[in-house]
Amino acid sequence: MTVTEDRPSVEPEIGQARKRKEDYRLITGRTRWTDNIVLPGMLHLAMVRSPFAHATITAIDASEARNAPNVVAVLTGADVAEVQGPLPCAWPITEDQKAPVHPAIAVDRVAFAGEVVAVVIARSAVAARDAAELVDVDYEDLPAALDLKDAAADTTLAHPDLGTNTSATWIFDSAEAGTGSPVEDAISTARDGGILLEREYRQQRLIPAFMEPRSTVVDPTGEQITMWSATQVPHILKIMLAMTQGIPESKLRVIAPDVGGGFGGKLQVTPEEVITLMAARRTGKPCKYTETRSESLMAGHHGRDQWQKLTLAATADGTVTGLKVELLADMGAYLGLVTPGIPILGAFMFNAIYKFPAYHFSCTNIFTNKTWTDAYRGAGRPEATFAIERLMDELAHEVGVDPLAIREKNWIKHEEFPFATVAGLEYDSGNYEAATAKARELFGYDELRAEQKRRRESGDPVQLGIGVSTFTEMCGLAPSRVLGSLNYGAGGWEHASVRMLPTGKVEVITGTSAHGQGHATAFSQIIADRLGVAFDDIEVLHGDTQVSHKGLDTYGSRSLVVGGEALVRAADKVIERARPIAAHMLEASADDLDFEAGRFSVRGTDQGVAMAEIALAVFAAHDLPDGVEPSLDAEATYDPVNFNYPHGTHLCALEIDTETGGVRMRKYACVDDIGNVINPLIVAGQVHGGLVQGIAQALWEEAVHDDAGTLVSASFVDYLVPTAADTISFDIEHTTTPALTNSLGTKGVGEAGTIASTPAVVNAVVDALRPFGVSDVRMPCTPERIWKAIHARDGADDGGGATAEAAMPHFDEDQAGANDEGAGR
Amino acid sequence: MIPAQFEYAAPTTVEEAVRLLAEAGDEAKILAGGQSLLPVLRMRLNAPEMVIDLGRIEALRGVRDDGDAIVVGAMTTHADVHADPLVREHAALVTEAVSHLADPQVRHRGTFGGALAHADPAGDLGAPALALGATFTMVGPHGSRTVEGEDFFEDLFTTALAEDEILTEIRIPKHTGWGAHYEKFVRVAHQWPIVAVAAAVRAEGGTIAEARVGLTNMGSVPLRARAVEDALVGKPATAEAVAEAAALAADGTQPPSDLNGDADYRRHLATVLTRRAVLAAAGA
């Protein structure tokens, strides 16, 4: 039993750039996307959606569809009005928040273009789609509230019954909270001899545009109803369906199989999930619904969409004294799962890394007749970071100093941590000086500034702009007490368990739900080090409420910093359960045992026993100490005590062709401090993807509706998601200031790139255009807007204007000749 | 999304295709690569009763030398056009334009004739074809006929092709030794051009002897900028002289306004891109 030979020393798994263990399967197509799931007798769903943004449904004639071949049923809102519970909103931000009932299938009125008005259930997807075309819906068009500012003035009501478009107003004031002084005092002081910046910025509407369209399969034939769904949140989905659909929670099982991305867009309880569930319960047969890309863009929830009115007060030398933030946030037509809280997540981040003595935040949530908004990568924090980082560049310009200098003047110094912020958070750690110094060198800041000067002086038609973003974010959602204080409908803990199998293998169960993040790999690395088992001997199980019975899923950069900590604690419990058994096996006192690299050894001797041996002994249970349970398995539920504060310095250089307004990225360097890194390869992937997504907001992506409320950017022809061809090689480095609030010293990285990059890019655009008198360009900074901004002094539009609300008609067959060859470009 | 049901025919000869088309009348659509037709069918913007796939007609593929011209079979893929040495030697402007067209997947499925017959004014092939004086041959039940480029493009998605005709080949007069450049302006790489300019220049010494300039997405059809062409003749290939001629590029055009830019912005772009295209074509 005792093993005495020397074991080879093992490199720690943490820190290794392991390729993801799940990728071989995903890349070669051995996948279980929801749409791959086929069950005996399965029926298929097709949705009938409203083409109108706001209309009364006066009649629906589904008789032709019902009689179409292979159609089993057609359900309208009227058919299910009594049984379809309202779709849930788990985050009412105020006591008096107003909200319309959110039906899965509209009953008598539609409130956005794309809302479901009927569902066809058929024996094949083809039959369902064909019959959906036959459902005849009569609408009576109603005036639609579309423009956010107009809607805020209640000029047209999105929901006439509510009597207003205002859902709620949420306020944080540092003087009231006792975290700072009154902001109005700072503003009046600044007005008299200081600097007062008053700006208004627009956060355009975005679409999460995950790779795998949403899909749901429901099997009602077992004792439990099983739902497979392309969701980020199987646990939350299960609870919410139980609470709204009259199904005992114990009779529901939700599985998120392989899920192809989410970016917040699958943090939702969707109408389509509820409809598929209703269809399956009604027909008694398994039902599947998979959306088309067009449906995904139109009816999957959107993100961002704010007007930001900002007032920054500073002394004449550029020391910040106060910040006032007044937001209008577009909810769209309904409140989704966490819709109202998304802009509120930004409330704590506008002050960012700077020492504002006074701060006031107010946000008014407004309904419009557009697709509802909800979480999108960064969720509230990109909006805040954009605003403050744009303002810091404006302040630098006002004072006449380098944008890095103005930041350094105002940021929290390394030695001032832990730091209590004016927004009421405590930042545990950070080193903005170190990250900035490293980024500056990596970027070649001084050389690029010199080149910029040369181009300006020579009147080069290609101008260079340099943009700065020194960001921090709060991630690792979230301490349950904080969520409680914000009236959020759930906690923020996470659960994990570790099962020690008799053959020495280990099953790790996490309540987080990976949909592209690489949990299987990173969590295996953590457990390999913690328990001293081989990386390949660890299986990470997740996303099935029957396996992972408890959890709060994946969003808000929480999986590692909250879920990983739960995992570490569960593993530590396994070690402690093994200790008395090891002592018994080694005939030693438990106090004399050391645990290292998967092995208990008797201090001062060469005697020891490996974890795998203990697992087998426990399985046999032939000779355990008296009173010891024959199990090593352990679980832990961890509730974080604080958020987690990654930070970084991002520097972007852009070339702007002043003749066309065209933008070419020249260099992008970032130094992110995300604490200790588990897997640098996965981190690089998160940073790269995050950067591109944030850059895309700055330059390319925008959900545009026309004046009838129809989504114009309704396909990837017009909603410009960039590809590799549109990006450059990023220079990515890190500084390491371990987080103090979790055992591994890690910080979140899933949203960092997206949060940081948008203002870096827009600051670079504006920096390039300063000599032309330009102080802002509205996102996305299209060549047209940039060119117009340059020529604004010549009487053209400035860069703030809207684009024409029309798409190029590449596929408009109504315009087509009778017999064109419908072929390639 | 799933297209509505349709009959599918894949003839192997032009004659058979013409016969099938005549039988089906306006209920049929021609599939010539499918890079636009399939999205249209899948989005249910059109539901033809029959789709006639020209993909198996070998006679419609390939490029041949025809004396003072080269002839491109309508079903030659963009990738094959791009790789073709005859095209490169005698119609370098086409090679240039095709190299920027859509993305590699589209270039390997989409066809030269299919794209031209689709007549998307933002398509990359109309302007170079027009600039090089290409003619279009089509075959119907009553035989074949050939039309000039400016007569072929009638309107948005509308060509001279009759309901019962099939585009079979495109004849491009040789422009051997001409410099060529296709200047395409996009926001993201896979996008249709916001504006693009196709320029071919025959230079003698430092002087422009002849120039051909075509405009993409500056109206409902591809356009030829004849005023620019005329103004360039005899001018030195310098930035100043070319800019002066290029300033005429947008004259008389009626470009669209959309998410990517309004008409005024496009008119401005046309002048800048024309200058750049001509200078690049002239090797300046």
Image (spheres, grey):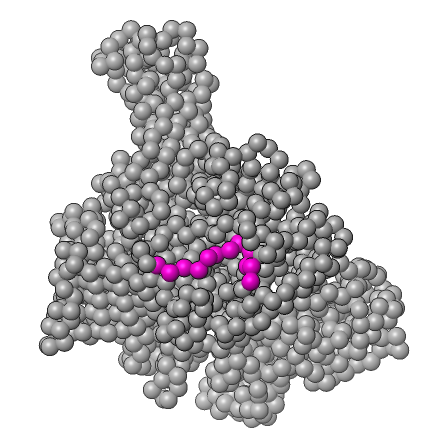
Q: Which residue: 33% across, 33% down? A: A637
- Left or right of A467 on screen, residue B163: right
In percent of width and height, residue A589 lies at: 24, 10
Q: Which residue: 75% across, 81% down? A: B160
- Left or right of B274 on screen, residue B59: right
Would residue A427 be visible to someone looking at this image?
yes
Asked if the magenta segment contains residue A493, the reply would be no
- Left or right of A466 on screen, residue A239: right
In percent of width and height, residue A480 lies at: 29, 43
User: Looking at the rendering, which quadrant does residue B95 occupy?
Assistant: bottom right
- Left or right of A802 on screen, residue B3: right
Asked if the magenta segment contains residue A103, the reply would be yes
Q: Main secondary structure of the magenta part?
A: loop
Question: What range is drawn magenta here?
Answer: A97-108
Judge by depth and name the residue closer to the eye, B224 or A341: A341
User: Looking at the rendering, which quadrant does residue A400 occupy?
Assistant: bottom left
Q: Which residue: 52% across, 80% down? A: B257
In percent of width and height, residue A613 lies at: 40, 14
Judge by depth and name the residue closer to the eye, B276 or B210: B276
| Quarter of the rendering occupied by the C terminus of chain A | bottom right
| Quarter of the rendering occupied by the N terminus of chain A | top left
In percent of width and height, residue A526 lies at: 36, 33
Judge by depth and name the residue closer to the eye, A166 or A395: A166
Would residue B43 be visible to someone looking at this image?
no
Q: Which residue: 48% across, 66% down? A: A370
> Above or below — where is A636 with respect to A486?
above
Q: How many marks?
A: 0
